[in-house]
Image (spheres, rainbow, N blue to C red):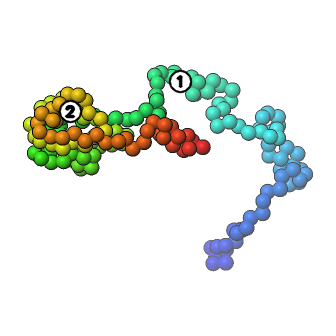
Amino acid sequence: MNLNDVHRGIQKNRKRKRIGRGPGSGTGKTSGRGHKGHKSRSGYSRKPNFQGGAMPMFRRVPKRGFNNRWATTVFAVNVGTLNDRFEDGEEVTLEAMAAKDVAKGTFDEVKILGDGELTKKLTVSAHRFSKSAEEKITAAGGTVNKLVAKRTPDERVAALKEAGN
């Protein structure tokens, strides 16, 4: 191989293939579309879920259950868990729970449930509280702070609709 052979045959700005320009061009007559069928027709566009006339996969697969995509996802934390992870007199916030791996993942609200014993005086801030959890926290000498939800269900629906458009 010689040095002057390196760039031979390489075209930077390649000419487009001119179709339907006679039999000598190699793409005359049917213009590379073949004979008959949907793809040979003008205005043809295949739907992404079209499977050659067979029953599409999304219709063959059984559908079960219900999924409400607008529902608020609530993360549940038990009073016993707070008793184990936090010290006496400590303030329990969403950030503190995330730092101590109590409430992790994605969720809209946190609810404190009354399962377990609480012996420490804690100031607990969360969106929701069960009656038994509220009673146990106040009985231990702690206080309950109810947080307002970040978004109402109506705002969540509006945000999902905007994301879809």
Tell me if residue 1 comes above or below residue 138 in the rendering. below
Indicate left or right for 44 with 57 as reference.
right
Of mark 1 and mark 2, the one earlier in the sequence is 1
Viewer-side residue, 49 vs 18:
49
Q: Characterize the local packing of mark 2: few (<14), some (14-19) or many (20 or more) Cα atoms within 10 angstroms.
A: many
Q: Residue at x 57, y 28 (%)?
A: 58
Q: Is residue 23 left or right of residue 98?
A: right
Query: What is the count of numbered marks?
Result: 2
The residue tagged with tag 1: helix, strand or loop? loop
User: What residue is drawn where x is 28% and y is 40%?
Assistant: 146
Q: Nearer the viewer, residue 46 or 99?
A: 99
At which x and y percent is residue 156? 47, 39
Q: Quadrant of the N terminus?
A: bottom right
Report the amino acid beneath label 1. Val
Residue 40 or residue 85, whichever sits in front: 85
Mark number displayed over residue 61:
1
x and y percent of residue 71 in the render?
A: 43, 32
Q: Secondary structure at mark 2?
A: helix
Q: Residue at x 79, y 57 (%)?
A: 17
Give the residue at mark 2: 134
